[in-house]
Image (cartoon, coloured by chain):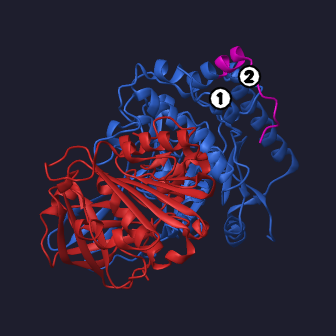
Amino acid sequence: MSQNLYQPVNGEIVDIIDESPTIKSFVVVPEENFRFATGQFVELTLPGEGEAPFTPSSSPAVTEKMEITIMKAGRVTALLHQCEKGQKVGIRGPYGRGYPVDDYVGKEIYIVGGGVGLAPIRSLFLTLVDRIGDFKKVVCRFGARTPADFIYKNTLFGSWQKIDGVNIKLTVDKSDGQWKENVGVVTTILSPNDVDIKNSVAVVCGPPIMMKFATLKLLEFGFPDERIYLSMEKNMSCGLGKCGHCMLGQYYVCKEGPVFTYDQIKRYPNIWA
Amino acid sequence: MSKVKNVFISELKPLLDTIAGQMDVYVPRKVGEHYIFERYNPSAAADVALNNIRVCTPVKEFLFPLRELAAVFPEPLEPKDIKPFAIFGLKDCDVRSIEILDKVFMEKEFEDQFYIRRREKMFIVTSDCSNPAQSCFCNVMGGHPYAQSGFDLNISQISGGFMIEAGSQKGGDFIQKHSQLFTVAGQDQLAERQKNRERTQKQLEQNNADMKFDVPVNTIVENSQDSEVYDQQAATCVECQACTRVCPTCHCFYLYDSVQKDYFVKMKMWDSCMRLAYARVAGGENPRKVLGDRLRHRFMHKLSYFLDRYGIDMCVGCGRCVDAEAGDVDIRTVLKKLYEELQAKGKKKTEAVR
């Protein structure tokens, strides 16, 4: 292993999946087996161009390759979207703390996700499903702008819905005319009766505005602050708790996060920005 | 000469030449009213004068350069050993800033080998301050106008020459190995040094008499989360970022990738939390769009978060930011205003100094 903290492991993009008009999943094979815990993130380098943090969307049980779902949002992600199979990349990490899945054993897990926020959630979902008997149930409430904007359509509209112990409801902000399920923001499909709040944990991941209102709704339902798990994506750069870019109050999101409980971060200003 | 901690030398040149015979030496040179470091050239130097205060640039540039290579593609970059080097004329605030940087870059499991390799090869020669600048406020931040630890050799000017003290094994070995340069320091010389130090300490305390706080600095800052002082004080900030560049403890950096002739590189460069886009994410959100919020974050990080994490303040009171800033934002004024506000709020906490 390299003694250089900043040196990525070389890797290659072996497949690219179009998920939505603005989102693609990249299947990356690192030269060395790469282990991560669900919810941890990696720094993906496009050599010569730049580096950006992403939480892998694949199961941590798969170590010879990983999937990274990326929305075209800034300079580096736009360049990644132009890449083709065979592109060489660099991967550093994994960094930070992911979802404390072992703490969820015996509980109902209430997952609220939106847009590209389904990427880390997919990794968590696959991890939970691998040992579904350990949890009372997994309740998912996912939203997207339009039906076309949902990612992982094949599994989300299909096989995931049929898993015992899993309950999924979907909503879109705007219907395409064919959409049979709910229309409205994700908070419109949240109900205090979805889970037994006394024995549940909530997991929220999505665009900042969605995370804010979903969290407020969960608090209104009576979820305690310390059982709402938020994936706080900031502009993690070094991943080592040094460079400072991702600081959220006293925390380095790259080191103590990206998964925090609401209780940990609620006292800081502008957490949703 | 057996192991002696304090010795005397009448002039500095023989000492410098001896060190320069073993490694590169950087010495202070006066430019205008400030000092900078430059490479010592034994043949050009008649003698080197001691700097009465800190050099205006931060010592971090020797350990964590403004810009350095961090990674290479496709062949990886491994940290290399470097040659030993000496810095002459560092001050207590400088060695305390090194202690702070060590916490960050030598943190267990996150060791930055580029930093560590330089740190291990650095020979630190400190000297006592003789005439603190108006901007110096190290006494408020627990510092002194003379180093008490963290040096290999320390120099104190006294009548007729200089007292040299060994502060480490390396320094002690140096004195022993080159004992022909020195005489053993006498009690009267030690007493003179003590008298000088007390005089300078008193001068500092007088200069900063308006910064006598009856609560720890972190208590002042921790109670300022909702304070308007930051917005008011940041009103004249021109975002020159000089405060963070010259700060010897600020260590934020930026990683960027670029193309060389036939390979790719990842570079590491100093950054500043006072910069607008510093915390912005790809989607465009920015938790600290407003200057006052960035100033607040800088204070919180330096004087509260860092203390919580590493048990030490991230400010040594060197006052470089006061000298450098272009927009009249003075760390001392901000602290004083926050303290006044805290007193007015009657929220004074009487908890013991941490």
Q: Position of residue A193 (x, y in %)?
A: 51, 50
- Towards the viewer: B55 or A98: A98
Q: On the rendered structure, is B79 left or right of B103?
A: left
- Towards the viewer: A251 or B126: A251
In the rendered image, the quadrant that contains the N terminus of chain B is: bottom right
Q: On the rendered structure, is A176 left or right of B132?
A: left
Q: Position of residue B247 (x, y in %)?
A: 49, 41
Checking the image for residue B347, the label placed there is 2
What residue is shown with label 1? B223
Image: magenta residue range: B339-354
The verdict on residue A175 being magenta is no
- Towards the viewer: A258 or A3: A258
Residue at 46 percent of width and 31 percent of height: B293
10 Å neighbourhood of mark 2: few (<14), some, or many (≥20)?
few
Residue B40 appears anywhere in the view: no
Residue A150, relative to residue B210: is it above or below? Answer: below
Checking the image for residue B20, the label placed there is none
The total of numbered circles placed on residues is 2
